[in-house]
Image (tube, rainbow, N blue to C red):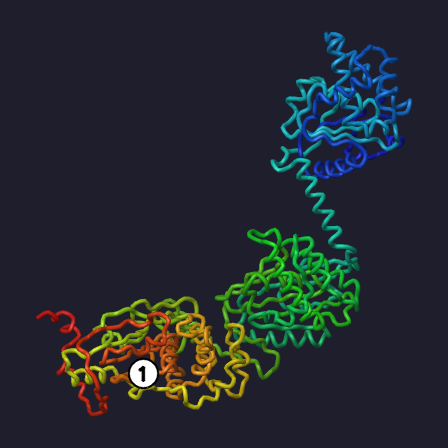
Amino acid sequence: MFEHKKIQSLQDFFVELNKRREQGVYFCRINGYNEQVHAFIQEYYQAARRSGVVIEGKIPNPDEKHLAYYGEIMGMEFQMSMGFLTASLKKWLPRMNDYQRNQVAASVYDSLDALRKSGKNENMQKNAYIKFMCWLYYKFERIVSQLGDNKVPKILYEGQISNYELMLISILSHAGCDVVLLQYQGDQNYRKLDPSSGFSEELSMPGLSAFPTYFNLKWLQEEIQKKQNQERLYGILPETMNCTNAWIQGKGLPDVQTDVRSRGEDPKLFYNCLLRINGVEDKLTYQSDLYQFQQELKKSGRRLVILEEAVPRPTMEEIGAIRRKNYADQQQMLVDLAANIQYTANQELQRLMHKAFLDILLEESNTEGMNLNRLTNKAVYLLCWLKRYQSELFCSWKLPEIACFIYLGGCKDENEAVFFRFLARLPVDVVILVPNRNQQCVLEDGVLYEINYPESLAVTKYPRENGEIQIGTAAYHAERELDSLMYQDSGMYRSRQFGKGVAVTLRTMYEEIAILWDQELKYRPNFSTVDDTVNMPVIFAKVSGVKDQNAGKYWSEIKGLITKDTLLVKQVPYVNSTDYNPVKAHAAEFFKNGKVQKTKIRAHPAYPYGVLREEIQEHILEKLQVLIDMRTIRGTFENGTEYTIVSTVLNLKKEIVHLIQKFDFTRKNPKIIYINPTEKPISLEDSIITAFLNLVGFDVVFFVPTGYQSIEQHFNHRLMEEHQVGDYLYDLQVPEFASISSNSSTRQSWRERIFKRGT
């Protein structure tokens, strides 16, 4: 029989029998954990699965069927002799050769004899013998025919071993097996069975700690499977890999300018950087430094891509060019989408792209809340951007060339962040510039090198040419800093400080209209600013009837609301459907798939607003989309009314356009007073215009002395607050307001109107 030998290192288990220092086998129990033990268990587990037995939990006791089959084949005779044991094994396990049979028989005899010496009677010995025979047949038959081979078979047992299990495994060990016991709960139970460690030795090595709570063979198998799946996923790996940032000296842009051949000498590495610079070191020279930086890169022959503010989203054409299917699981998706990466000009670069693509997406798959659909979308974005920029970055690439990708403004979303993390694993220097300290870049990466400067500068365009460089004087920058102190969270606002506005319609009493009418928006209730957007409290009301049937006072109060920024509509309708409109012919191409086609509209010769401020053009087109999405106008997405909305909003009269152009979202807003004293209906176009201008930020008040429905006829739901102020009068003639007196002495004050109504 084989003797147990003491290991000097865990790798002794994997030495073939004839090459071991001492001819023998190893039986070791492991009660503690470290990385070395983890690696050994993984390797031993795979060896036991190939040529041995893995036991997870207890060895099942023989059941009635097992015992019945044993009795049918072997009978129930038992003799405590080597001859009987050898003959029984020959009949029960015929695949063993004579040497193996003699080894097992001798080992079984010794174990049964130990039972006899401990006081167990013959019946107990017989029961143990039958249990051993059933276990050998049903659990260990695959290894008994390997006993004594130069490649020693392995047994791996996980859990708290029982007395008879220990006896059988010791039998197999002495017959020629290596054995490892994994005891996650420690050695206490084992010591009760084998106080002197006569059957096995305990692994003793420095740095052992308790096993992690998640560790077991099932978890280990899953990890091995993941690793094997990833190896199949990656295919042939590249021969080179990135050395990112390890070589830089922390100088910022001068590091990027370092000649790529002097960054490192290992031919298996390419030396690149992932750098983010927040703020600016010197406001006066910042843009000049950037211009000089890109000039030096071009002079050195390096390939260069520069983007500002955003990575343009993939177009429908780019997305359509990515070959993809419906996927059942993550691996299927990654394998299929990775096949889109083709760079036949350089096989090594294609393998680098392939590996970086998989590395990044596997990392992303572990983020909280990630699912297959989101991960697929990220992958498609990544492939679209790679195809878009790869020719600029890698045309005729060969080691040790390093391209440079400069991004001004910082990553705005996770898709951009994933793209730049991906680029940083390719032969590319990635430089992210965030000169405005008020902006945030969402990129996070373990290798990211970050430099922070205290000064802040608003730069939205990279200075590619000399003529594009705009350098502020010291006084200019001082004034900008003063602006920040005065106009940020102070309740004070500089002229046209905000580029976006959202209208919030106020519900008011009738008397409040006159009070709020000529106020700046910032003084009205519910005014606020969030980031770069103003919440604008506006009036949208209908006044029905005439108080006390006093027409003179009625017209006088209306005149009191006419300001220099008020559009007065006295002729109904203001715009008729039969009026000439050059946009009508193009409305169908300006609105497709539920979206206002902003780019197409702005480039079209029929577009009339190209001379307006950029932010005002965006404001108009955004509110046009909102008006359609709200389905405020009756017939929207039912009978083509959406195209009427588009053509009407894009053909506003100049007097309205001028009011919109001069509109400052924090100050007095433009107004419309619409008077309809007759039964003449308001046109659909007038309803569209007033609903649109309400969204733009206008105050809109309809004066309808008849009380008839007017604009409501074209709305799907109630938008305006209606005030019933008096009796209905008919067939009034709208006067020339220049001849109307608005002398405040002839009218009650707003306080009198509110507090003395009952006197």
Quarter of the image that includes the N terminus: top right
Q: Residue at x 32, y 73 (%)?
A: 538
Instruction: Give 384 or 305, whichever is nearer the viewer.
Output: 384
Compared across the picture, whether 513 is left or right of 292 comes to: left
Q: Residue at x 72, y 43 (%)?
A: 224
- The image quarter containing residue 19 is top right
Quarter of the image that includes the C terminus: bottom left
Q: Residue at x 48, y 66 (%)?
A: 438
Compared across the picture, whether 509 is left or right of 364 comes to: left
Within 10 angstroms of label 1, few (less than 14), some, or many (20 or more) residues?
some
Residue type highlighted by circle 1:
Pro
- Identify the residue position indicated by label 1 in the image: 681
Residue lying farthest to the right in this orientation: 98
Secondary-structure class at tag 1: loop
Residue lying farthest to the front in this orientation: 639
Examine the rendered structure and indicate whether residue 133 appears above or below residue 490: above
| Number of marks in picture | 1
In the rendering, at what x and y percent does residue 181 appear?
A: 72, 28
Examine the rendered structure and indicate whether residue 610 appears above or below residue 42: below
Instruction: Give 395 or 542, whichever is nearer the viewer.
Output: 542
- The image quarter containing residue 361 is bottom right
In the rendering, at what x and y percent does residue 568 appear?
A: 30, 86
In the rendering, at what x and y percent does residue 423 appear?
A: 67, 63
User: Is residue 232 visible to the viewer in this orientation of the structure?
Assistant: yes
Instruction: Give 127 or 104, whichever is nearer the viewer.
Output: 127
Examine the rendered structure and indicate whether residue 418 appears above or below residue 573: above
- The image quarter containing residue 400 is bottom right
User: Is residue 475 visible to the viewer in this orientation of the structure?
Assistant: no
In the rendering, at what x and y percent does residue 124 appear?
A: 73, 11
